[in-house]
Image (spheres, rainbow, N blue to C red):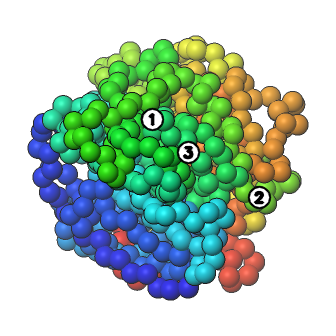
Amino acid sequence: AALVRYKFTIATQNVTRLCKEQEIVTVNGQFPGPTLYAHEGDNVVVQVQNKGPYNVTIHWHGVRQLRSCWADGPAYITQCPITPGNSFTQRFRIIDQEGTLWWHAHISYLRATVHGALVIYPRFRKPYPFPKPTAEFPLILGEWWNANVEDVINDAIRRGAVPLESDGYTINSQPGDLFPCSANDTTRISVKSGKTYLMRIVNAAMNHAYFFKIAEHNLTVVAVDASYTKPYRTDLLLIQPGQTMDVLLTTPKTSGLFYIAVRVYNSQPPRGLPFVNTTGTAILEYRGTTSNNSVPLMPTLPAFTDTQTAFNFANSLRSLQSSVPQSVDEEMLITEGFGLVSCPNNSCAGINGGRAVGSLNNISFVTPDIAILQSYYYGVNGVFTRDFPDNPPLKFNYSQQNPPLSIWQPELGTKVKVLKFNSNVQIVFQNTGIITIQNHPIHLHGHDFYVVGQGFGNYNPQTDPANFNLVDPQMLNTVGVPTGGWAAIRFTANNPGVWLMHCHFESHSALGFEMVFLTENGPRKLDALPSPPRGLPKC
Ligand code: C2O
């Protein structure tokens, strides 16, 4: 194992997309940001220097952070922001994870442009569990706003509204041929016939899951969220925001140009916001293709609202190897929904003049101004409470569209759920019809979890557990809870510290669609939260 060092310099720069110049925040002047490379077992040290005008933190999405909670990065959860002109060095080790993860800013809306891939190779001389590819390349899926993204989120918060939708979808930061002023800069990937390529796909989009397809090509999924899968052959992927997929592309004997296409999967009746319905594209270009003006072939993509296809894809993934907990010590049922908080004189932009909020078990998370991990470690009282409920406070027909207004009012609070060290936890996420039903990508920090079951409608604790997959369920760090349905996960709370769990739609987490786990120390010194690193930004 080696020591891998990187330096991130965060600054603003002007870039032009969709016919418009905009000032964005970048890392090392790159957009998307630099790809980090490490081998499993390596120690990674990243010095993050903030030369931009905004407060920043960086999160290593999916990295287990075993006993390195201080390096995790979510603002006001594990650390306070790195203020302009200051820096923070984050140190962590990559343990038992191989494949692709990613990193992104974890404060306000900065991750729209502050993100990049994290490639984790197997240890030296250890092969991949699939044939060695000829070459590898990252494909980072994103979203673009014509407006300044900090204005987008601040304006939404001021008005109590859901943030504006983006203006375009991107692959390696380019929207592609179908968007205005973009065709000259479309991302092009050059390949040869008869080879196998490893695509490291990151869905860095802020608020959308994507269907992904390459015209006339078959794909084989070999890992999701840096956890190997049984090779799964398909011509279509569904990638939730936050998820990463390692996918083999074997090129047939052909020539010409083929679109790599991403289309939004957006199923949120009845109050979904309008979104841009153009397909984001890149071009797969066979070497030796002569005619410059040949038109790339476009794949046929599912409809935006094709929930069954989205479900079938997610439900087909299986772990290559699994050690899913066979018994459970802690059981939770967590409802996901929205709600309305009243504003003086009904002055907010939400329904009935209220402020739109997201909630878990009808609690809308309030971000404190002192980091929770810091206040826990130093024993500062009054920052959070330990009463996050194990079950929803209200029982109703969850998948019914528009349940009565009386259950739309969440409680505001900074509530954590305390977990005993090494306890096996099962959580069932239940989507509700409060304001809208939707596919929520739930991400847990500091742990990978097994998805042991999922379905549509209301979870039934009497009958559904009998069908759980306790043999080879897929391990993930972000699960798309089916639209109008539920998903059950299991993990072992073996990582002491404070861990955020949230919807990876940034527009939802910004509105309080978050909660926090606090895992207690274990009996051995080795199982305890270490002391804070030097230079930790404090509040
Ligand atoms: Cu990808 Cu809380 O993060």
Q: Amino acid at mark 3?
A: Leu
Residue depicted at 24% across the width and 40% down the height: 291
| Rendering coords of residue 353 (x, y %) | 34, 19
Question: Gap in Å between the C-alphas at discs 1 and 2?
Answer: 33 Å
Q: Residues within 10 Å of mark 3 (few under 14, many from 20)?
A: many
Residue depicted at 80% across the width and 28% down the height: 460
Q: Quadrant of the N terminus?
A: bottom right
Where disc 3 sits, the SS reads: strand
Which residue is disc 2 drawn over? Answer: 322
Residue 145 visible to the viewer? no
| Rendering coords of residue 203 (x, y %) | 44, 47
Query: From the viewer's perspective, is residue 128 above or below residue 20?
Result: below
Question: Gap in Å between the C-alphas at discs 3 and 2?
Answer: 23 Å
Position of residue 434 in the picture relative to residue 137 (left or right): right
Q: Amino acid at mark 2?
A: Ser
Q: Quadrant of the C terminus?
A: bottom left
Q: Residues within 10 Å of mark 2 (few under 14, many from 20)?
A: some
Which residue is disc 1 drawn over? Answer: 215
Query: From the viewer's perspective, is residue 360 above or below residue 538?
Result: above
Q: Nearer the viewer, mark 3 or mark 2?
A: 3
Q: Is mark 1 within 8 Å of ligand 1?
A: no
Q: Are marks 1 and 2 in contact (CB under 8 Å)?
A: no
Q: Quadrant of residue 419?
A: bottom right
Position of residue 39 in the picture relative to residue 453 (left or right): left
**Which of the pair 175/393 is nearer the observer?**
175
Q: Residues within 10 Å of mark 1 (few under 14, many from 20)?
A: many
Which residue is disc 3 drawn over? Answer: 219
Position of residue 356 in the picture relative to residue 375 (left or right): left
Position of residue 268 in the picture relative to residue 329 (left or right): left
Where disc 2 sits, the SS reads: loop
| Rendering coords of residue 323 (x, y %) | 79, 60
Task: Looking at the image, tell me whether mark 1 or mark 2 is earlier in sequence order.
Answer: 1
